[in-house]
Image (spheres, rainbow, N blue to C red):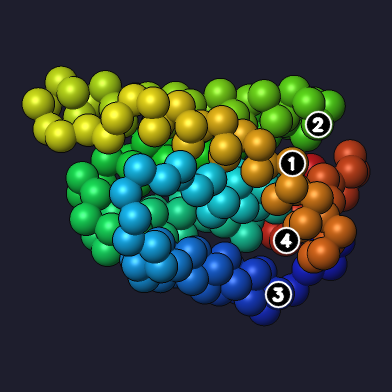
């Protein structure tokens, strides 16, 4: 990540937003109308966490807010609930970024899965407390398990397909700060 120009940073941010909006569009289009099927993993959550852990300047908090708020609006989810929990989850990672960069992959995977479980179950609890209709808890558990299983595949794809490596000690970020 040494010598990254501002143009490259904004190109990466635009790519993050475009991929996010692509995943939102994918969720909105009804491909299968059958009931009772298992949920798909939240792949964009996995992509967001890879961005935040490996290249946090490419996924600023406003971009995460924009994509997940758009997802809440278009999927008619409780407005802002998932967005708020997602921003909290990514900011937990961002506040402890040095620890995440030093973790072995298994521990990183466990933390990312735990944060996602907190997001999903926290949303479920908040919906229950407000007496809103919440998805079935079993479906939420399947979503957590499938998303946790999708995280290593996402990391592998972004690492070898697009070069998302963990920064090495002594490298500089896009703003010239030592990592």
For label 1, the residue is 152
* Pointer 1 with pointer 2, Cβ within 8 A: yes
* Disc on the earlier residue, 4 or 3: 3
For label 4, the residue is 174
The residue located at (72%, 29%) in the rendering is 108
Q: Position of residue 154 (x, y in %)?
A: 70, 50
* Disc on the earlier residue, 4 or 2: 2
* Pointer 4 with pointer 2, Cβ within 8 A: no
- Under tag 1, what secondary structure? helix
Answer few, some or many: residues within 10 Å of disc 3's Cα (few below 14, many 20 plus, some between 14 and 19): few
* Disc on the earlier residue, 2 or 3: 3
CA gap between label 4 and label 2 equals: 24 Å
CA gap between label 4 and label 1 equals: 26 Å
**127 sits to left or right of 116:** left
For label 3, the residue is 8
- Under tag 3, what secondary structure? helix
**120 sits to left or right of 1:** left
* Pointer 4 with pointer 3, Cβ within 8 A: yes
Query: Does residue 33 appear in the picture of this structure?
Result: yes
Question: Which image quadrant for residue 109?
Answer: top right
For label 2, the residue is 105
Q: Position of residue 40 (x, y in %)?
A: 50, 48
């Amino acid at each position: 990540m040494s010598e990254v120009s501002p143009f490259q940073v904004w190109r990466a941010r635009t790519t993050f937003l475009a991929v996010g909006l692509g995943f939102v569009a994918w969720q909105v289009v009804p491909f299968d109308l059958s009931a009772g099927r298992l949920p798909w993993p939240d792949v964009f959550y996995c992509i967001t966490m890879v961005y935040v852990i490996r290249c946090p300047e490419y996924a600023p908090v406003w971009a995460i807010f924009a994509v997940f708020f758009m997802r809440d609006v278009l999927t008619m989810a409780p407005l802002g609930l998932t967005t708020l929990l997602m921003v909290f989850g990514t900011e937990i990672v961002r506040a402890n970024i040095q620890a995440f960069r030093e973790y072995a992959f298994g521990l990183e995977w466990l933390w990312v899965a735990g944060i996602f479980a907190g997001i999903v179950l926290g949303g479920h609890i908040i919906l229950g407390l407000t007496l809103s209709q919440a998805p079935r808890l079993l479906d939420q558990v399947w979503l957590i398990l499938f998303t946790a299983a999708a995280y290593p595949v996402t990391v592998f794809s972004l690492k070898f397909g697009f070069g998302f490596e963990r920064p090495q000690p002594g490298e500089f970020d896009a703003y010239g700060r030592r990592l």
